[in-house]
Image: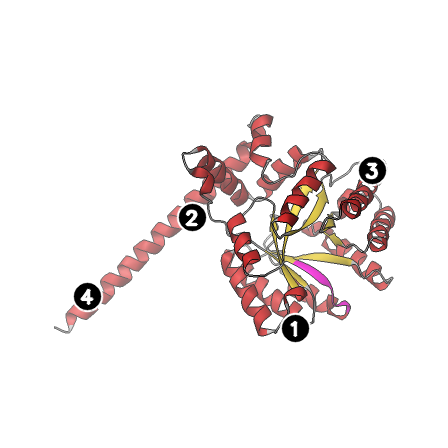
Amino acid sequence: MSSRPAQLRYRGEADCRRSACRRATRALDVALLDSTIARLLPSVPRPLVERISRRYIAGPTLADACRTVARLNAEGREATVDVLGEEVRSVEEALAIEAEYRRVLETIEAEGLSSNVSVKLTALGLKLDFARCRAGLEAVVSDAAARSNFVRIDMEDSSATDETLELYSELRGAGHENLGVVLQASLRRTVADVRALAPLRPNVRLTKGIYVEPPAVAFGEFEAVRANFVKALEELLAAGCYVGIATHDEWLIGEGLRLVQEHGLERDRYEFQMLLGVREELGETLVRDGHRLRIYVPFGEHWYEYSLRRLQENPRVGGYIAADTVSRMLPGGGSRRPSSSR
């Protein structure tokens, strides 16, 4: 009689091991499929890429972006507008991006839209001329301040992290309060960066991060990134920072909700953020429950380059979009949404 429970226990353990192996195999298969999709993207006809990206990019013009923001506002969401065009090759191109951001801010004010802007420093010439980039950023931030608006400095790959945080700290030190920054939980340095920035009480968008980085620089394991996200969020909230909790990962959203409740934060002291066209039903739930939600709205003539780069940098997103596109082509597929763990 006593051997039967042991047999059941061992059988259960064996079943668990087999189940874990099956899950690992499926995860590997999905990762390989996602990577294959990402590698094949440059050979996909441009019209098809445009069709796929239509949900995730407002369009090539500022008018497209404004229509998208107006729709989001009507649905109870706020927005942040990004002018596509990072990695500019000349000072003239950087000046053109600066001018476009000022036009965006002017139009947001004129049309009464609820939106701020997000700026990549490479688009303002970070890799060309640090001083020129600083001047351009300060001009955009000053313009935004005159219109009671806000500028978020996007974070790029780790080669730009030091200079990005340096510029952010310099401009905050110069009295520009309407300026925020992005931190990426995938980077090993992020919690230390939170502590270094804490005296400024920074306004931070916290993301997982999409860039492929060396193991010495970034966590490669899914759960390690999640754990670092939660740790960074805990540190930010403890320092009294306003945080944009930017994720489509339901578990992390749950952790975010738990932490803001534990800190007794009012609904105007934090927000959630998502990408345009991603996990819309999850965003609807957050808005319905009374949480502020901001949607990242990219637009510009460089939509094709942005689409390829974004999907190649994060094959998981490429696989998600491919699955989403196929599901929409199937009967009744318009109501289905594949899950995302970003």
Three-letter residue code for mark 3: Ala
> In the picture provided, is 285 more to the left or to the right than 78?
left
Q: Are marks 1 and 4 in contact (CB under 8 Å)?
A: no
Between marks 3 and 1, how big is the CA–CA gap? 40 Å
The residue where tag 3 is placed is 96
Three-letter residue code for mark 2: Ala
Mark with earlier residue (4, 2): 4
Mark with earlier residue (2, 3): 2
Between marks 4 and 2, how big is the CA–CA gap? 30 Å
- Rendered location of residue 199, percent (x, y): 76, 70
- What's the residue at 58%, 39% (across, down)? 55
The residue where tag 2 is placed is 27
Mark with earlier residue (3, 4): 4
Judge whether 320 appears above or below 261 on screen: above
The residue where tag 1 is placed is 238
Q: Residues within 10 Å of mark 4 (few under 14, many from 20)?
A: few
Q: Are marks 3 and 4 in contact (CB under 8 Å)?
A: no
> In the picture provided, is 323 more to the left or to the right than 3?
right
The magenta stretch is: 200-205
Between marks 1 and 2, how big is the CA–CA gap? 36 Å
Numbered tag placed on residue 7 in the rendering = 4
Where does the N terminus fall, quadrant-wise? Answer: bottom left
Query: Is residue 204 within the magenta segment?
Result: yes
Residue 16 found in image quarter: bottom left
- The nearer-to-camera label among 1 and 2 is 1
> In the picture provided, is 303 more to the left or to the right than 40?
right
Three-letter residue code for mark 4: Gln
Query: Is residue 143 within the magenta segment?
Result: no
